[in-house]
C-alpha cells in the first residue's frame, strides 16, 4: 500500500490494533501518503498518527454535495496545523457569521464553484434550501478562516452544544478525551435536561485497560474550562459506527440508554 485515506476513527482503530499486536509504529513498507477526513483532527492525535505512520498526515474537507473536495493540506511531517487547508483550485469558500453561535470570525462554511452539485434529485425545495441564488452552498459546518486563508472546521452547526449560555464544540471536548493514553476514541453530544443542554461523552476503551473514571475526569479538567467538561462519561469497548468506521452520533443515546438511566 502506498496511499491511505481514511476517517480518524479508522486510523485510531488501526493504531490500537497495532499496539495490541506489539507494534508502536509501522515497519518498512511503501506508504508515502496518509490523509484524514470526515471528522476534525486534534493536535495530540495528529502527532501520534505521524509517529505511527512515519509520514505526514494530511487533512481535507469535503462533502457529497461538492463531489467530495473543498479544501486540502500539503503539510510537512511535524507541522502542528490541524486546519483542512486552503480551498482547492477553482473553489470559493467563505464563512457566514449570521447564525446561532456565530461571530468573531466563526460561522457556517459556504462554498461555491464547479464542484457544487446541480441539486438533489427531484427535490427542488431542499435544493433551494441549501443553494442560494448566487450559487453558494450551505454546508451545515461551523468554521473560521485564518490569516493564511486556511479553513478550520469546528464541527457541525447542529451539533453545537450551548451549556449555560456558552458555546461548546464537541471536537474540542473529544480532543481532550482522546489525549488520554487509555482512550481509543470518543464521541461527544449534547442532551437537554432541566432547561439546559449538558455535555455527554462516550469513550471507547480496551477491555481490561479501562482508565479510572476519577482520573479521566481529572485529566480532562486540566484541559477544559468548567462549562465544557462532560456531565456524564460512558465507557464502552465499542461505539456505534458506519462501515467506514465513522461514529454514528445520532445512535448514541439509544445505544447507551441503559447506562444513561
Image: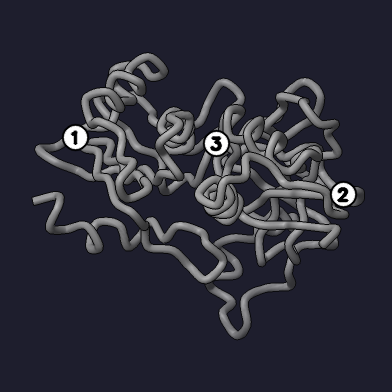
Q: Nearer the viewer, residue 195 or 85?
A: 85
Which disc, if any, is residue 30?
none
Q: Secondary structure at mark 2?
A: loop
Return the residue nearer the eye: 193 or 237. 237
Mark 3 burial class by Cα count in 10 Å: few <14, some 14-19, many 20+: many
**Which of the two marks, 3 or 2, is nearer to us in this view?**
2
Provide the residue designation for mark 1: 196
Residue 240 percent coordinates (x, y) = 37, 62
The numbered mark, 1 or 2, whose residue comes first in the sequence reads 2
Disc number for residue 32: 2
Q: Position of residue 169 (x, y in %)?
A: 44, 34
Residue 100 in view, yes or no: no
Q: In the displayed orientation, state which residue is furthest to the bottom.
A: 122
Contact between labelled residues 1 and 3, with CB atoms less than 8 Å apart: no
- Residue 69 in view (yes/no): yes
Name the residue at 77% across, 20% down.
147
Q: Quadrant of residue 185?
A: top left
Q: Which residue is depicted at the point 61% across and 55% down?
A: 7
Identify which residue is drawn at 44% across, 28% down: 176
Residue at disc 1, secondary structure: strand
Above or below 21: residue 227? above
Amino acid at each position: 500500500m502506498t496511499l491511505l485515506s481514511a476517517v480518524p476513527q479508522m486510523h485510531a482503530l488501526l493504531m490500537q490494533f497495532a499496539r495490541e499486536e506489539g507494534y508502536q509504529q509501522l515497519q518498512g513498507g511503501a506508504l508515502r501518503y496518509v490523509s484524514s477526513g470526515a471528522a476534525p483532527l486534534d493536535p495530540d492525535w495528529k502527532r501520534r498518527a505521524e509517529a505511527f505512520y512515519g509520514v505526514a498526515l494530511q487533512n481535507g474537507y469535503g462533502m457529497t454535495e461538492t463531489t467530495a473536495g473543498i479544501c486540502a493540506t500539503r503539510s510537512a511531517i511535524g507541522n502542528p496545523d490541524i486546519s483542512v487547508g486552503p480551498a482547492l483550485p477553482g473553489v470559493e469558500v467563505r464563512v457566514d457569521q449570521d447564525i446561532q453561535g456565530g461571530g468573531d470570525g466563526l460561522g457556517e462554511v459556504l462554498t461555491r464553484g464547479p464542484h457544487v452539485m446541480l441539486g438533489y434529485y427531484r427535490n427542488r425545495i431542499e435544493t433551494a434550501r441549501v443553494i442560494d441564488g448566487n450559487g453558494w452552498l450551505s454546508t451545515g459546518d461551523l468554521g473560521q478562516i485564518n490569516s493564511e486563508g486556511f479553513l478550520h472546521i469546528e464541527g457541525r452547526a447542529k451539533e453545537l452544544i450551548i451549556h449555560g449560555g456558552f458555546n461548546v464544540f464537541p471536537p474540542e471536548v473529544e480532543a481532550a478525551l482522546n489525549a488520554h493514553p487509555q482512550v481509543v476514541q470518543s464521541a461527544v453530544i449534547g442532551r437537554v435536561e432541566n432547561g439546559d443542554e449538558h455535555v455527554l461523552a462516550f469513550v471507547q476503551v480496551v477491555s481490561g485497560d479501562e482508565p479510572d473514571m476519577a482520573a479521566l475526569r481529572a485529566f480532562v479538567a486540566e484541559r477544559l474550562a468548567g462549562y465544557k467538561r462532560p456531565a456524564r462519561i460512558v465507557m464502552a469497548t465499542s461505539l456505534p459506527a458506519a462501515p467506514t468506521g465513522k461514529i454514528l452520533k445520532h445512535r448514541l443515546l439509544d445505544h447507551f440508554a441503559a447506562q444513561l438511566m
